[in-house]
Image (cartoon, rainbow, N blue to C red):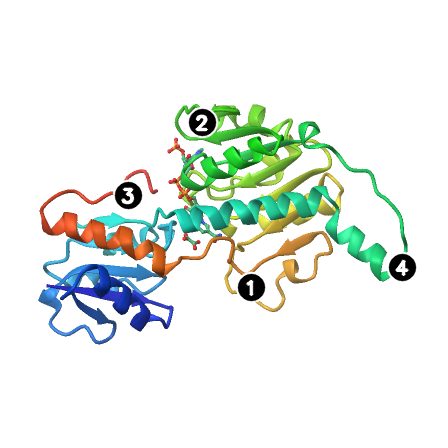
Amino acid sequence: MAMLYMSRWSNGDLWRDLMTSHLPGLDFRIHPETGNPADIDAVLIWRYPLDELRSFPNLKMIASLGAGVDHVLGERHLIPDGVVLTRIVDPAMTAQMTEWCVMAVLNHLRRWDEYRELQRERHYDELPTLCPDQVTIGVLGLGELGGDCARVLAAMGYTVRAWSRSAKWQDGVTCFAGRDALREFLAPCDIAICLLPLTEETRGILNAETLGWMKRGAYVVNAARGQHIVEADLIAAIDRGHVAGATVDVQSVEPMPADHPFWFHPKIVSFPHVAAQTVPESCTKQIAANYRRMQRGEPPEDVVELERGY
Ligand code: NDP
Ligand code: OXD
């Protein structure tokens, strides 16, 4: 049997070296060098056309090379019945994400851009700052990434609340669950950080109405998917002064087209989807362990619930 790499990244040889170091003797192929489709029992996939998946009669496992699976579930009908979809859950990814969110929070709260501007103007002055315990941060999504981000922010002394789909409990974090609790959750937030998966329930979750529930001067951080925010509503909320600004790692169209307003908006800091990158050296261990489980007839870990969408 063989594992097939189907990714828009051009580092297939690195993945082959790493996967075969964990699974000696593995037949690792890089699309489009598929060989006999009947050999393929596992596919590693990242933002790649899914049309061929149904032509692999012995396919058992699809491993998303990212934590998010919207790139696969957007065309769920192309996933053959009975095939398991797994996703990356990796400490190297979690650590990067928490670091990026903390960076966004600190840049905003410690007024990094304003001090850089003062420096350019050779203006030696001080601006008021809030102490951590005066700041309420709300994390949307209390999963692998949101959970760690909330934990670290709470340890830094912020007042942290989090919102999830099902009821949760986390030390030092005030937890809310379900759509009905969204308003109560958002209302006192000085900063909202989106770490949700993209599903039909979460698409456009930050929009004119929900941003309006936040207090005047609140700040938005989006490290999840661009489609979580109705971008025109965010810009309107910033331009009328209700929202102070935003730091976004993700956008509704990626790469951002040249005329995307985020390129130019003075109060939006935009990154090119780099908050938490897949680290092949780390996450291949997880994928190899899942492949071994599958070959022993055991269920893999970090399996996506297709009905739920994450
Ligand atoms: P998890 O599946 O571990 O956690 C998802 C969280 O979101 C859970 O707490 C879940 O609730 C909650 N959630 C899901 N649906 C809803 C809903 N309708 N209402 C309220 N809460 C909901 O995902 P991860 O933490 O691993 O990843 C989150 C996302 O981050 C990924 O899906 C991906 O889109 C994005 N990401 C972005 C990266 C980047 O570089 N920008 C890198 C990696 C990931 P419950 O706990 O009840 O299930
Ligand atoms: C992911 C991502 O989902 O990189 O892992 O966005």
Pointer 4: residues within 10 angstroms few (<14), some, or many (20+)? Answer: few
Q: Distance between the residues labelled 1 and 3?
A: 30 Å
**Which element type, helix, strand or loop, lies under badge 2?**
loop
Q: Respond yes or no on whether mark 2 lies under 8 Å from ligand 1.
A: yes
| Mark 1 or 3, nearer chain start | 1
**Type of amino acid at the residue the image marks with label 4:** Arg
Is residue 52 at least partly visible in the picture?
A: no
> What residue do we see at 59% from left, 37% from top?
192
Pointer 2: residues within 10 angstroms few (<14), some, or many (20+)? Answer: few
Q: Residue 178 carries which label?
A: 2
**Type of amino acid at the residue the image marks with label 2:** Gly
User: Position of 310 compared to 100: left or right?
Assistant: left
Q: Distance between the residues labelled 2 and 4?
A: 49 Å
> What residue do we see at 37% from left, 48% from top?
90
Is residue 92 at least partly visible in the picture?
A: yes
Q: In the rendering, at what x and y percent does residue 181 appear?
A: 51, 24
**Type of amino acid at the residue the image marks with label 1:** Met
The residue at which mark 4 appears reads as 122
The residue at which mark 3 appears reads as 302
Q: Residue 256 carries which label?
A: 1
Closer to the camera: disc 4 or disc 1?
Answer: 4
Q: Is residue 255 above or below residue 217?
A: below
Closer to the camera: disc 2 or disc 4?
Answer: 4
| Mark 2 or 4, nearer chain start | 4
